[in-house]
Amino acid sequence: MKVFADLHIHSKYSGATSERMNIPELVVFAEIKGLNLLGTGDALHPTWRSELKRDLEPVEGGLYKPKTGQEIYFVPQVEVATVHEYEGKARRIHHVILMPGLDVAEQLSDELKKFGDITVDGRPVLNMHPAELVEIVMSLDERNILFPAHIWTPWWSIFGARSGVNRMEECYEEEVKYVHAIETGLSSDPPMNWRVSWLNKYTILSFSDSHSPYPYRLGREATVFELESLTYANLREAILGESSRNRVELTIEVPPAYGKYHWSGHRKCGVGPLPPDEAKKLGYKCPVCGRSLTKGVDDRVEELADMPRGYRPENAHGFMYLLPLQELLALSMGLETGTSLNSKRILSEYEKLVRRFGSEFKILLEADLGEVARESGPEVAEVISRMREGRIKIIPGYDGVYGKLILGGEEESSHQRKYSRLEDYL
């Protein structure tokens, strides 16, 4: 069975997160998006865990589903931050942990509260070495899964330009043997990660890191699994790459230029986005204030890459680029980037299309464009067509600013590729 999964999200108990990040609304928006498996987010937080127990019930196979009966499944999940010193510099790294039960999450919460306040934020900051984190996680239950989050983001990631390291072993030391996957993050994609050959033994995953239940955030990046049946054991087997019966089929990526840190810049001074060559010429210093630029993910990948652009390893699974439908609707209406994607005008068209075709993924991946045109007009159909064919230009994001979509001409984004439908990638 095909499983569309977003296994890195948050709850309303994480900082800078929507109050609407609760189970009832996550279920509604997951159905609208076309997801059928979600992480719970923030499973170490005691108040959120109480709400999870209130709203979810365990089902056979080690997962959970809403007590209201919808066919949306959940796996206990949390993102944690570790802070440690390496070679005289503080390293701040985010890690995602998946667990086979809320009882395991409760036990892990008890263990990790020795290293930081578990109650202050759904994504706790722990003063400990990542290797120690892995040791505790795996000694508690060998079925647990841990992988580094959004691995190239400048702050709070394993290879981040601001506080990361250069090798997996420098982060996890001897416990690296228990780490089997990496998460791309919004500003990188599989081809960028393939250029670092020693990462190719890790399963590439993509998830949203969503702080909002709305479908332009939830599931904006996702992983499509092929599982014999939807169980935690099969999911774990797929992530660990242990069997062809349970496997990652492909990842759904936003084009990396859409992400907030793809190229370098300094938002405060309005400098950016700067392509790697220009940023390098400036010595990664802001020409206005002289402070350090936020180095882009594209630049950071280039620093560690040992393979040329375009390299693809033999064992690589597929991927495809999608942009959120609400972004495409705004583009079709000629609205400026930064327009509220939950405006009445956009939501009206969005709801009409979902009622007609069933979910956002079905609209973006499968819908006949002639039918889309009849339902919402030729402009909407044209924008979806351009996305499918890689004909939407993106001005890259930088220093916390999302990339800007531009509809005009026939120029392709340098990080797009053409496809027709999901089956082409399976």
Image (cartoon, grey):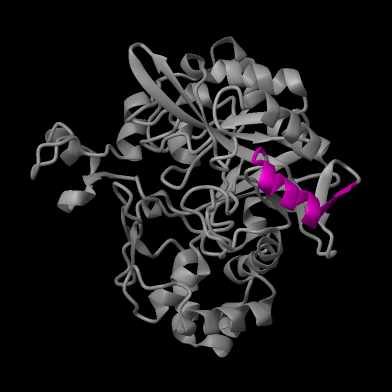
Give residue 118's position: percent from left, percent from top.
59, 35
Give residue 104's position: percent from left, percent from top.
77, 32
Q: Is residue 64 magenta?
A: no
Lateral position of residue 344 relative to residue 7, left or right: left
The image shows residue 237, relative to residue 289, as above or below, that is above
Lateral position of residue 141 relative to residue 285, left or right: right
Magenta segment boundaries in residue numbering: 44-59
Lateral position of residue 26 relative to residue 115, left or right: right
Identify the residue shown where x is 40% and y is 27%.
307
The image shows residue 339, relative to residue 105, as above or below, that is below
User: On the image, which quarter does residue 43 sit in?
Assistant: top right
Give residue 320's position: percent from left, percent from top.
54, 53
| Residue 82 seen anywhere in this rendered image of the structure | yes
Number of marks? 0
Q: Determine the main secondary structure of the stretch shown in magenta.
A: helix
User: On the image, which quarter does residue 302 sit in?
Assistant: top left
Identify the residue shown where x is 58% and y is 10%.
174
Identify the residue shown where x is 48% and y is 48%.
15
Identify the residue shown where x is 84% and y is 60%.
67
Lateral position of residue 408 relative to residue 14, left or right: left
| Residue 1 seen anywhere in this rendered image of the structure | no
Give residue 110's position: percent from left, percent from top.
69, 28
User: On the image, which quarter does residue 206 sit in?
Assistant: top right
Residue extending farthest to the right is 60
Q: Does the magenta stretch include residue 50?
A: yes
